[in-house]
Image: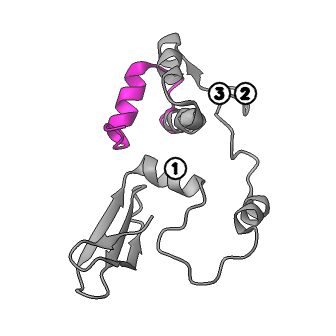
Amino acid sequence: MKFLCVDCDSQMSFAERQLPGDGTLAATFKCPKCGRVVAMLTNPMETQLVSSLGVEIGGRTVPEQPLQTIRSAVATGREDAFDDGSREQGAGSRTSWSADALQRLDRVPNFVRGMVKRIYADYAKERGIAEITPAVMDTARSELGLEGM
């Protein structure tokens, strides 16, 4: 993905990246000809999705190495990278799902379902919620800023 200045028809250069700490990401790009600046802001779910794909926002500072994506996945891979939260991790620590919540989760596209399930499971675990229901999902979406998703 590249950003183009409409007035100058030139590719904008990466200017700055900020991680405010609330799960969002902000990046600015500047036109080298006219100096116009544009900003991009991602919500927490978009930030997590982009990060999980290994995308680096802001351009490269060193040339890409052969098979870099695969090397980094193998070198820094986590055992729980694809864990959807369904595996029990200790007595009493597993969060259960109501039938209505599971039906709602089934409507999430398959390629992101594990990540979405993990977000809700982490939310429930952090707040001591024993069962995830549609009401808990609604509250989590609101508190995490994911209403538009």
* 131 horizontally vs 90: left or right: left
First in sequence: mark 1 vs mark 3: 1
Look at the numbered disc 2 and give the secondary structure of its residue: loop
Q: Dot 1 corresponds to which residue?
A: 49
- Identify which amino acid the numbered label 2 is placed on: Ala
Q: Nearer the viewer, residue 67 or 146?
A: 67
Q: Nearer the viewer, mark 3 or mark 2?
A: 3
* Mark 3 residue crowding within 10 angstroms, few (<14) / some (14–19) / many (20+): some
Magenta-drawn segment:
124-149
User: Is 60 above or below relative to 24?
Assistant: below
* 39 horizontally vs 135: left or right: left
Q: Dot 2 corresponds to which residue?
A: 91
Q: CA distance from mark 1 to mark 2?
A: 30 Å
Q: Residue furthest top?
A: 99
Q: Which mark is residue 94?
A: 3
- Identify which amino acid the numbered label 1 is placed on: Leu
Q: Residue at x 37, y 37 (%)?
A: 149
Q: Position of residue 74 (x, y in %)?
A: 79, 59
Q: Position of residue 56 (x, y in %)?
A: 54, 67
* 33 horizontally vs 118: left or right: left
Q: Position of residue 120 (x, y in %)?
A: 50, 33
Q: For the N terminus, give its image quadrant.
A: bottom left
| Residue 17 position by quadrant | bottom left
